[in-house]
Image: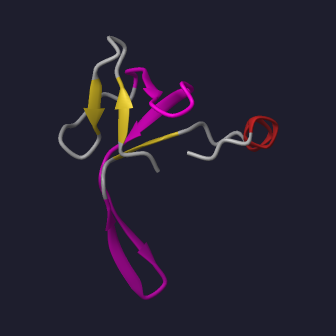
Amino acid sequence: MVRYALNKNRIFVDAQLSLYDKDKIFTCIFCDRPLFYKKAHHKTRKETSFWVCGHFSHNVNIEEVQETEIDC
């Protein structure tokens, strides 16, 4: 999970302060790769439920992660 990103105009944005469209393009401030916005939501796992805050996420393509060793 990444809290901060750059929007298409290269302006610093915080995932927890606003709601963004899923189709907008964001860039990682650490590795300059594309990020996807994920809004806050409620999750339930077995007996525990919790809130996941709004955040940005890298592509979950396993092969890409192994090749580039994304660590941010």
Rendered image quadrant of residue 52: bottom left
Q: Residue at x 34, y 21 (%)?
A: 7
Q: Is residue 58 magenta?
A: no
On screen, residue 20 above or below 10: below
Q: Which residues are magenta?
A: 23-52
Q: Position of residue 39 (x, y in %)?
A: 32, 45
Closer to the camera in the image, 48 or 10: 10
Q: Is residue 35 magenta?
A: yes
Closer to the camera in the image, 48 or 6: 6
Q: Residue at x 37, y 14 (%)?
A: 8
Q: Residue at x 55, y 38 (%)?
A: 58
Q: Position of residue 54 (x, y in %)?
A: 31, 49
Horizontally, residue 68 falls left or right of residue 2, namely right
Horizontally, residue 32 falls left or right of residue 44, namely right
Q: Residue at x 49, y 84 (%)?
A: 46
Give the residue at the far top of this rendering: 9
Q: Position of residue 70 (x, y in %)?
A: 66, 41
Closer to the camera in the image, 42 or 14: 14
For the C terminus, the quadrant is top right
Horizontally, residue 8 falls left or right of residue 62, namely left
